[in-house]
Amino acid sequence: MILFPLQTRGSVVIITGASDGIGAQLASQLRRKGAKLVLSARNEERLRASAGPEDLVVAGDLTSEVFRHTLIERAAAHFGHIDALINNAGRGSYYPPSRAPLDDAHSLFELNFFAPLHLAQLVTPFLCQRHGTLVNVGSIASQISLPWLPIYSASKFALASLTTTQRIELRKHGVNVMAVFPGYVDTGFQAHAAGEAPPSQVVKGKRFAVTAEECAAAIIKGMEKRRQLVVTPKIGWPLVWLSRWFPGLVERRMESF
């Protein structure tokens, strides 16, 4: 089926993790383009502070199945339809694999993988009706295993695989499914992550990060053009191919961190 460009103005878009970082920038830019927004995050005060007067704010815990049902039901009831879901919420964990607490690993996968899976299942009938868009915000860590973020990398590898199969399933219904692999983005990711402090080399690398505004703009451009994949910044592409063609070399380089 031919997928026509997304008309942003008037589209109903659900954004998770919308209270700060990439999610807040997505909301700001889509609002300026005339989209109707459903914003979700745990921190209701911060969410409402950045929301527009016409936005629907639905605060809650995405690791709760009950809340996920509530989010989609309220969005559909308020606007009558849903055109796009951006699964942006997620968090990191710096525990090494040999010492990662299982309860932390379970909760991370619940937010980074099972919440996007379940939300997509709930919203699929609406997206099929509107030939809509599903966006899963993953990470460059879904293509290159980062030893300082092992459980996070595993969750994003799982989400990337899921995104591919969702695309295969939903394309024939006119739904575009887009994966996003951000690299280093200047957000509060490190502050919100569980576990030990990241390596100093990683912290220093923040000076090369793209802004959340730049990342959000790349995502929206991809949505409008109905792309299957967005890598931002573009320097991430050589890293992806280097890992695929020379995995041993990349692994040895990672050992230095």
Image (cartoon, rainbow, N blue to C red):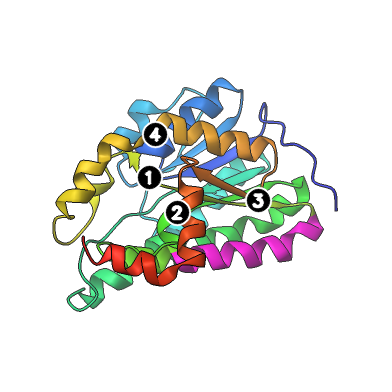
Residue at 34% over, 69% down? 251
Residue located beneath label 3 in the image: 228
Residue 77, above or below 104: above
2 vs 3, front mark: 2
* Distance between mark 3 and mark 1 Cα atoms: 26 Å
* SS label for mark 1: loop
4 vs 2, front mark: 2
* Distance between mark 4 and mark 1 Cα atoms: 17 Å
Answer with mark 2 or mark 1, whichever residue precedes in sequence: 1
Q: Residues within 10 Å of mark 2 (few under 14, many from 20)?
A: some
Answer with mark 3 or mark 4, whichever residue precedes in sequence: 4
* Distance between mark 2 and mark 1 Cα atoms: 31 Å
Q: Residues within 10 Å of mark 3 (few under 14, many from 20)?
A: some
Answer with mark 2 or mark 3, whichever residue precedes in sequence: 3
Residue 75, given in percent of the width and then of the height, sits at 57, 44
Residue at 72% over, 65% down? 168
4 vs 1, front mark: 4
* Distance between mark 4 and mark 2 Cα atoms: 20 Å
Q: Which residues are magenta?
A: 157-173
Return the mark for residue 239: 2
Q: Residues within 10 Å of mark 1 (few under 14, many from 20)?
A: many
* SS label for mark 4: helix
Return the mark for residue 41: 1
3 vs 1, front mark: 3
* SS label for mark 2: helix
User: Who is closer to the viewer here, 156 or 24?
Assistant: 156
